[in-house]
Amino acid sequence: MHVCYRSPIKRLPQILHTLDYLSPQCQNEGCSAALIIQDTKFLVCKHQLSHASDYFRALFLANKSVPISGAYQNSYNEFAIVVSSFSHPPPATQFKWFLESAIQAPILSDITDDTLETCMRLSKRFRAKGVEMRCARYIQDNVSKKAPMVALCWLNWVLKHKFDQATHDACLPCVASASLRCLEEHRNMVTEKLLADLLAAKLRTLYDQVNKLELLTYLFSWSFLLPFLSSTVKQVLLCAKL
């Protein structure tokens, strides 16, 4: 049965690169598929990719009850895929990073600082729970070693891509270690709710480390920010247990 999915792709691009992720067994059993990402063709095992991604399982099974966005069937077992609206890195590179973090052939690649955000975004795009969990584990294991502003970037990605609460909470202590002046300089990266969470984390840390007089002095040093803060953030500051 020939199945077409609506897609912004108008015509087939010229294929300049082919990346083969098939094992000899896949070629013999006929479980291969070709995925076209702009000028690059990816030869993949349908069984492997279906196991890693609900999106591709639905695509290969032609399950119309599950929405398939950004996909077009060119011919039998060949599909053009819209990976992302981001042009950097190139979509083919983005998909390569995702694919090599999702399937074990030829080898399962580690998540790295360079691939983290792309894999987080595409784990949601392609509904790949395994890749999502690997990204979450990478953040939880490594965020404490990062500079506060790197941790803030990661925390923003966690919020943007709706990762779990444990990953969110793992980022907070490192981000909260940044000075208030540093946070103010990067105010465009911090929502009111996030700022409230960060100040609360600072208060918890300070309350454990300093006496009440020193804490009161520190709180007073924040007073210059009060006119610019929302009622949510003010409540965090003013309700601190002294």
Image (cartoon, grey):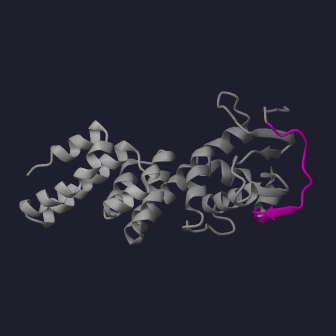
**Percent position (x, y) of residue 185?**
42, 58
Quarter the N terminus occupies: top right
Q: Quadrant of residue 152?
A: bottom left
Q: Name the residue at 85% across, 33% down.
A: 2
Q: Is residue 202 left or right of residue 59?
A: left
Residue toward you, 17 or 52: 17
| Residue at image point 44% right, 56% down | 186
Numbered disc total? 0
Compared with 43, 78 (above or below) is above
Left/right placement of residue 61 relative to residue 238 reads: right
Image position of 70 with respect to 14: above or below:
above
Where on the picture, by quarter, is residue 176?
A: bottom left
Q: Which residues are magenta?
A: 8-24
Question: Whole-percent x and y of residue 138?
Answer: 47, 64
Q: Position of residue 114 (x, y in %)?
A: 59, 66
Residue drawn at (26%, 51%) of the image: 224
Residue 227 belongs to magenta span: no
Check residue 15 for magenta coloring.
yes
